[in-house]
Amino acid sequence: QVQLVESGGGLVQPGGSLRLSCVASGRTSGIRTMAWYRQAPGKQRELVASQTRSGSTDYNRSLKGRFTISRDNAKNTVYLQMNSLQPEDTAVYYCNVDVFRLAGPQEYWGQGTQVTVSS
């Protein structure tokens, strides 16, 4: 099992910044892609950004370069730097990891951290 704990969410004014962190613990060997998703009220969960173990990244194009994902493999931690936040970024942000196992890949989710952008 892999446990994921997110932190860094909160209330921020439009135009502000936040940095989310997600620490993986437990059976972390085999972690491949680490990613952030978000789910706004009444909407489906969507990919925000992902990063492979080797460093390749993928972003939701709607973010227009405002968010940056990074990870520290030694610490089993993934970060999401969010700049120029807008009210439409308000959502619960979830950490997700994909783990290689001989029996087949496994996927884990964090409990989510609330990000609210409001004046």
Image (spheres, grey):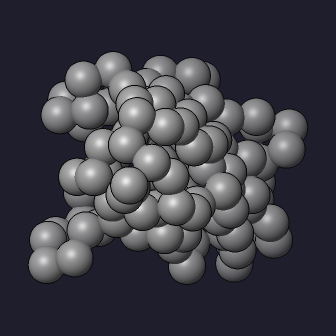
Q: Where is residue 103 in the image (x, y as percent from the top left)?
A: 53, 70
Q: Where is residue 75 in the image (x, y as percent from the top left)?
A: 85, 44
User: Is residue 108 visible from the viewing direction of this image?
Assistant: no
Left or right of residue 59, residue 4 in this image? right
Q: Nearer the viewer, residue 95 or 87?
A: 87
Q: Quadrant of the C terminus?
A: bottom left
Give the residue at the far front of this rendering: 119
Q: Where is residue 46 in the image (x, y as percent from the top left)?
A: 24, 57
Image point (37%, 43%), residue name: 14
Task: Find residue 49 and report its image quarter.
Answer: top left
Q: Which of 32 and 48 is in front in this view?
A: 48
In the rendered image, the vertical position of residue 101 relative to residue 42, given as above or below: above
Image point (33%, 20%), residue name: 65
Image point (86%, 38%), residue name: 74
Q: Position of residue 106 (x, y in %)?
A: 50, 68
Left or right of residue 47, residue 82 in this image? right
In the rendered image, the vertical position of residue 13 relative to residue 9, given as above or below: above
Task: Find residue 4 and report its image quarter.
Answer: bottom right
In the rendered image, the vertical position of residue 63 relative to residue 4, given as above or below: above
Image point (76%, 34%), residue name: 72
Q: Quadrant of the N terminus?
A: bottom right
Left or right of residue 14, residue 8 in this image? right
